Image: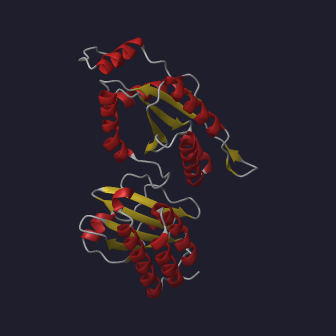
């Protein structure tokens, strides 16, 4: 497929697609294939938050690599440019950067990197990259950038921003309507070893696979959040200890069955996790800290387990006080 044909294909896809994030991720590989590139990155930025979708043929470009901050670049009126300085440090020979302004504060940057020595980029290719970036920017505007702001592009789980907006409201429901609420903090055991031994591309597959297993293990009313790196949090409304235990065991079973890499050198991972229960006095920070303490206990106990503590008698007494409508004064 040539770049010109790709512009039309992306334009048609944007009109009918429901999952724009999935389209952006697919677009990175399509652009790389059409251009013969080793690396493609699409950055979206809104109000200081950055989201990136990337494709790396050899898995050598560091995750921290970003040619320019998208909003700053577009706001400054930068035009497309070919970057060569410092590219060898990230495994590339050169890269084309195409910025597009979405609004005063929002921006999109398409970066296409090449590894061939002496590669000459015709002006026609640069113009084609500009057309592709323009179509993607149109799609970002059409598909509500606000929705992207609360989703993690790598795993398609909710992100920390969503959690900060939603968890206080869930805790208010606990106080007002006397509904149980639990959270489970999770992270992938020895994830750094996976990246160091098998490469970041395998690490990305592990993150995506674990995220999918989490989504498949919870109910439609629950939420899975990627806090960052290999850390996750599950928010489980209207879930008491028995339900939390069922979900935890389901997650353990699903993750243990996952296999990454190839048949000759499979990569398997496990999770450690810990649960915590909300009460009428819980704050988001305290609830997450409690789940983290259970998570650390799971790691200290040998990893590959999710600890689901029994609710303490003091907490159950406090919930009864909240349910009766009396003023709670118990300190946990």
Please state which of residues 298 and 86 is positioned toward the viewer in this rendering.
298
Instruction: Give the residue drawn at x 33%, y 65%.
Output: 70
Residue 58 spot, x, y in % from top left: 59, 62
Q: Quadrant of the N terminus?
A: bottom right
The image shows residue 111, relative to residue 196, as above or below, that is below
Please state which of residues 229 and 171 is positioned toward the viewer in this rendering.
171
Q: Quadrant of the C terminus?
A: top left
Residue 290 spot, x, y in % from top left: 40, 25
Residue 69 spot, x, y in % from top left: 33, 62
Q: Residue furthest right?
A: 264
Residue 280 spot, x, y in % from top left: 31, 24
Using the rendered view, name the quadrant where residue 2 is placed: bottom right
Instruction: Give the residue drawn at x 43%, y 55%.
Output: 64
For this view, does 195 lie left or right of residue 157? right
Q: How many circles with numbers are drawn on the protein?
A: 0
Residue 39 visible in the shown view: no
Residue 226 visible in the shown view: yes
Please state which of residues 48 and 65 is positioned toward the viewer in this rendering.
48
Please state which of residues 192 and 258 is positioned toward the viewer in this rendering.
258
Instruction: Give the residue drawn at x 66%, y 43%.
Output: 258
The image shows residue 162, relative to residue 235, as above or below, that is below
The image shows residue 243, relative to residue 161, as above or below, that is above
For this view, does 267 lie left or right of residue 113? right
For this view, does 153 lie left or right of residue 209? left
């Amino acid at each position: 497929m040539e770049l010109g044909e790709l512009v039309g294909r992306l334009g048609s896809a944007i009109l009918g697609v429901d999952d724009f994030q999935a389209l952006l991720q697919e677009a990175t590989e399509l652009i790389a294939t059409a251009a013969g590139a080793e690396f493609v990155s699409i950055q979206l930025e809104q109000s200081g938050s950055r989201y990136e979708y990337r494709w790396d043929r050899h898995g050598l470009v560091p995750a921290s690599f970003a040619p320019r901050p998208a909003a700053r670049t577009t706001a400054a009126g930068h035009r497309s440019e070919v970057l060569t300085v410092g590219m060898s440090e990230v495994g590339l020979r050169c890269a084309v950067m195409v910025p597009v302004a979405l609004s005063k504060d929002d921006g999109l940057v398409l970066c296409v990197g090449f590894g061939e020595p002496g590669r000459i980029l015709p002006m026609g290719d640069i113009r084609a990259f500009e057309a592709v970036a323009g179509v993607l920017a149109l799609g970002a505007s059409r598909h509500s950038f606000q929705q992207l702001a609360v989703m993690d592009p790598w795993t398609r789980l909710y992100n920390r921003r969503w959690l900060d907006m939603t968890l206080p409201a869930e805790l208010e429901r606990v106080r007002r309507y006397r509904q149980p609420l639990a959270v489970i903090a999770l992270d992938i055991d020895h994830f750094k070893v996976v990246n160091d031994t098998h490469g970041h591309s395998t690490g990305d597959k592990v993150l995506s696979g674990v995220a999918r297993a989490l989504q498949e293990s919870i109910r439609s009313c629950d939420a899975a959040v990627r806090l960052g790196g290999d850390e996750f949090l599950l928010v489980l409304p209207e879930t008491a200890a028995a339900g939390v235990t069922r979900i935890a065991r389901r997650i353990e079973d699903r993750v243990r069955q996952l296999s990454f890499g190839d048949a000759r050198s499979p990569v398997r991972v496990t999770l450690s996790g810990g649960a915590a229960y909300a009460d009428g006095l819980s704050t988001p920070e305290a609830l997450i800290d409690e789940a983290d303490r259970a998570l650390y206990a799971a790691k200290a106990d040998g990893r590959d387990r999710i600890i689901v503590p029994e609710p303490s008698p003091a907490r159950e007494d406090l919930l009864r006080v909240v349910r009766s409508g009396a003023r709670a004064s118990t300190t946990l």
